[in-house]
Image (tube, rainbow, N blue to C red):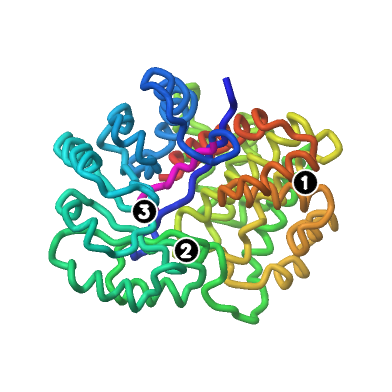
Amino acid sequence: MKYSYVARQPILDKDKKTFGYELLFRDGPKNTFPVIDAEEATSRLLSDHVLSTQYATLGDKLGFVNFPYKSLINRVPTLFPADSLVIEILEDCEPTDELLEAVKEMSQLGYKIALDDFVPSKAWREFLPYIYIIKFDIRIVPLPKAQLFIDRFAKTGIKFLAEKVETYEEFEHAKQIGFDYFQGYFFSKPEMIQRKALKPSFMSIIQLLTEISHERIDYEKVEALISKDVTLSYKLLTYVNSSSLVKKKIQSFKQALVYLGEDKIRKFISLVALASTDSQKPDYLYGLSIQRARFCELLVHKQLSNIDPSKAFLMGMFSLLDSLLDLPIEQIIAEVPIDKAIKLALTEESGALGQLLSLIKAYERAEWDDVSQLCQALHLSQDTLSECYDNAVAWAAELLSVQR
């Protein structure tokens, strides 16, 4: 069986809360959904990727999936659960009577349908009563032109999604003219640049993350750092005592640390420490930080023996600090006592760690040509990459659920 990549990209609402994920598949060199019979499609997409990992990690979020013309005509989307799927009609589909009948039928079955990379034309008018979301690529349809369409159809109940939103200014503009949802990389860039000193509490968090990145954790140092943070202390004890295996309530940090063991405490602290820096940041940023950290670590353990796993984990965790702190990454790194190789990876994407970070980012953006080249450079196999990504997504989702 030919192997396929799967990645996901977040879709945010006006409050920058995660509304759903677009699930991106790559099947062969053409990056297309396979035109295959329903049984094989079920096996490869639902079992191998969607039901086994992706839908398990969507929670109450929607999964947006691209389907080309033939798949829609064959009603392949009906293999997916209707309550967690948005069917995206690709931009190169012809608006034929045959397609309209398929769209009507799937809409009547309760499926939500989106027009992807939509360019307004009369040919699609008959489809609009059955459309849940219209997605505008604002690089193709500029915001002023999209506004004319949105204003015209504002009372129809159709939702509008802006794709390729790259800056905070574009996000604000798109929100003002009536877009409901947003997809792009604006959320992973600072909203405003502030030249200010890092707060002492944040420096404590950096020390804590650095401490747990070591191969052997010094429990006394970790305990001393945790005791300085009330929120972290509370979450640690709550987390440990929520386990059904705990017979007698644990009341000290040292007890909690010993009970959890190095691996669990390392992962748990990584997430809650970062999440305690700013409660106003989108939840997706924290999830992506911990997901990147785990993805890096798994890849190193599997096939990259020349890289220190703890350094890979810490690099992934710190790769979104500029977004979390609204500061340039260069300024943050200059004030943080971490390994030089990690600094170079974060600021220049150089060295083996830098290549690994480039690979992670390319995978998240579904830039498959770059993914293939970087895999070759790092001597990583495609199946290992996809397996580690799925595991990292599931692991991060499980950890995040503990915090809610």
Say which quarter of the image contains residue 179: bottom left
C-alpha distance separating marks 1 and 3: 39 Å
C-alpha distance separating marks 2 and 3: 12 Å
Residue tagged by mark 3?
A: 116
Q: Residue at x 57, y 19 (%)?
A: 1
Amino acid tagged 3: Asp
Looking at the image, residue 350 lies above or below residue 301: below
Residue 145 at least partly seen: yes
Q: Position of residue 16 (x, y in %)?
A: 40, 62
Does residue 6 belong to the magenta stretch? Answer: no
Looking at the image, residue 109 lies above or below residue 12: above
Q: Earlier in the sequence, mark 1 or mark 3?
A: 3
Q: Earlier in the sequence, mark 2 or mark 1?
A: 2
Q: Position of residue 10 (x, y in %)?
A: 45, 52
Residue tagged by mark 2?
A: 164
**Helix, strand or loop under label 1:** helix
Amino acid tagged 1: Lys
Looking at the image, residue 277 lies above or below residue 90: below
Main structural element of the magenta stretch: helix, strand or loop?
strand
**Image-based side of 256 in relation to 13, left or right:** right
Q: Earlier in the sequence, mark 2 or mark 3?
A: 3
Q: Position of residue 247 (x, y in %)?
A: 48, 22
Amino acid tagged 2: Lys
Q: Residue at x 63, y 40 (%)?
A: 294
C-alpha distance separating marks 2 and 1: 32 Å
Q: Which residues are magenta?
A: 18-26
Q: Position of residue 185 (x, y in %)?
A: 52, 62
Classify mark 2: residues with Cα within 10 Å, few (<14), some (14-19) or many (20+): some
**Helix, strand or loop under label 2:** strand
Residue tagged by mark 1?
A: 311
Question: Cβ–Cβ below 8 Å for labels 2 and 1?
Answer: no
